[in-house]
Amino acid sequence: MKKDYLFRLYTLGKVEKSALAVANLNRICEKYLKNRYQIDVIDLENNTQMAEDSGIWATPMVERRQPAPIVRVVGDLSNEDTVLYGLGIKNINV
Amino acid sequence: MKALKKESRNPTKNGTKIQSAVDRLKTGIEGFDELFGGGIAKGRGLLVTGTAGTGKTVLLNEFLYRGIQSFTQNGVFVTFEERPDDIIRNVSSFGWDFSALIEQDNLAIVDCTQQSVPVLQSGEFSWDVLISRIEKMIKRVDAKRVAIDSIGTAFVRFSQVVDEQKVRELLFLLMDKLKAMNVTVMISGEKTARDAALSRYGIEEFVSDGAVTLELHSGQNKTIRIMSVIKLRGLDYRSGKVEYEISPSGLTVFPKIPVDINVAETNFDVRLKTGINELDQALRGGIPQGHVMLIAGNTGVGKTLLGMQFIYQGLNDGEKCVFVALEEPIQQILKTANAHGWNFEKYQKKNELIFIREGLLDISTDQLLYRIVRAVERINANHVVIDSVSSLESSSMDRNKVREFLIQASTFFKTRGVTCYMNYLSGDTFGAGVGQLLGSLTTNEMRLSSIVDGIILMRYVERDESIHKMLNIFKLRGSDHNRNILHYEIKRGGIKLGERFKAK
């Protein structure tokens, strides 16, 4: 089934920050976008070319691929407001 | 004579010899390594600062290009500034084919321009991915050189998203990583014209072991580019400002010749013939080898001719010569020479004579000196004529620079045992009367007197309702000489010295 929101979460290795970002993103999406989202977690450690091609300069970083345009939020996503604003989630749901 | 010259040409003539644990890396950029006394610090970071348009990016690009071309040292370009496509396009105007080098895995560009994707920060993050991208590129091409362009744009790009402290962290981490990988780094940093401080972001001095500053100054007719080394941890370097230019083939630096206090002494036993027998006699055998002679006189008095005669004599004796023609075109000199029966072209073809011709608008004394030094070294010249120093003075409009040039040139000549004529146009009065010859010695000549070893004055004197030419050896350091005022005439075959000029 096609989802409204497609997120890609870039991480680098199994570190605390990565786990925290995954958890935070899941929680926020469950709360605001239930059943309307998909998250792909990509570990760049084994994917050098992807890091180069995507131009990712820090991790963790979440990228909204759908709907266009592409927007990004960098960090462990611990600040919910910034995530909602940065990924354009809240504006739509207000 | 030959043996003596060899001795004075010993390369370790610099009095100060600095022992250092730091190895040097030759960049291959013309003149740049000399500025650093042989190369930049290997495995370390060199900061390149300057305002916009000074050529920082060109320097960085050439650093990588020369590494690949001249030393088979591969490179990685980390750009926060221009997109890779733009970099490739820009350097192609220098004839550097970066696409091909990237294709052959000699070069890689890491694009940190982070495109135009909007980003916000929420919580903690790490720079590891960027550091590891750069690290992997370095490993992939086995890079020995890394260029980072630039500190300022890294801040501009990232500080919109994250705070400046975090950007500082990135640069520290990056430089630490690069140091651990033992690559030599050139990193550029912006400078606002007014801001004299090296550090704009409070980081520049910490990420680098050395710093070089590029500046632009407007000359009368063109822009003058100045480069100076600010610091170089653990290595000796040349202080002071030097000129550089950006030509279609890249950057050229014109390093100053170090003033050497341990100058080879003049050998008074070896005399160089002037090409005029009577003048040789008056000089007690000729010009002492290694002497710098000032030939002073008004226009048309025969200074250039005296220089040409000196050169022609040298060439006939099998010596190598350099003629610096600032007054007239080389063709004109050759024509005059032919009229006197001197075939200079023959020696030019054999590479025994080099003419240096420089346009006089905004002439750069650093560049000129560099060209003279290169020419003298190339053919091992020991006769040099500079025609003339006064034209240098009037065109560069900077007497101190000319004085500095003369000191450096004469020091260089002395260390190699080169004998030199420096012609000087002195504006004395046309009708100087009897006994006034010395009175017409201008302050300029006096000012230059300490630099030169000898002065020959050439003067017009009005007498018996006609103009006579008179010559006097005014000074000849360390040697006896004829102190009389002597008649001379210019004929086919050059200057003919006559008898003593007698006051009525």
Image (cartoon, coloured by chain):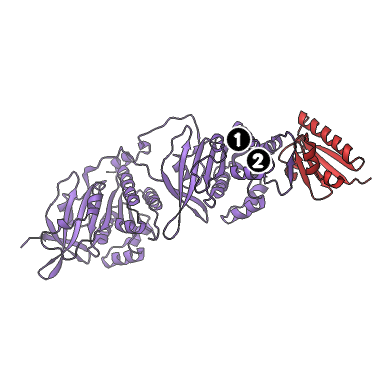
With A30 as the anchor, is B342 left or right in this view?
left
Task: Using the image as rendered, state which of residue A3 and residue B299 is in the foreground.
Answer: A3
Label 1 Cα neighbours within 10 Å, binned few <14 / some 14-19 / many ≥20: many
Residue in view at x 24 percent, y 46 percent: B450
Residue B95 in sight = yes
Task: Using the image as rendered, state which of residue A38 and residue B358 is in the foreground.
Answer: A38
With B29 as the anchor, is B107 left or right in this view?
right
**Label 2 marks which chain's residue?**
B
Residue matched to label 2: B141
Circle 2 — which element? helix
Q: Are marks 2 and 1 on the same chain?
A: yes
Residue matched to label 1: B175
Residue B98: % across, % down: 62, 50
Residue in view at x 57 percent, y 39 percent: B201
Residue B281: % across, % down: 15, 52
The red-tinted chain is A
For residue A70, above or below residue B206: below
- Residue B222 location, quadrant: bottom left
Q: Is the C terminus of chain B in the top left, top right, bottom left or bottom right quadrant?
A: bottom left
Residue B168: % across, % down: 62, 36
Which amino acid lies under the numbered mark 2 shown in the image of this protein?
A: Val
The purple-tinted chain is B
**Label 1 marks which chain's residue?**
B
**Sequence-wise first label, 2 or 1:** 2
Residue B25 in sight = no
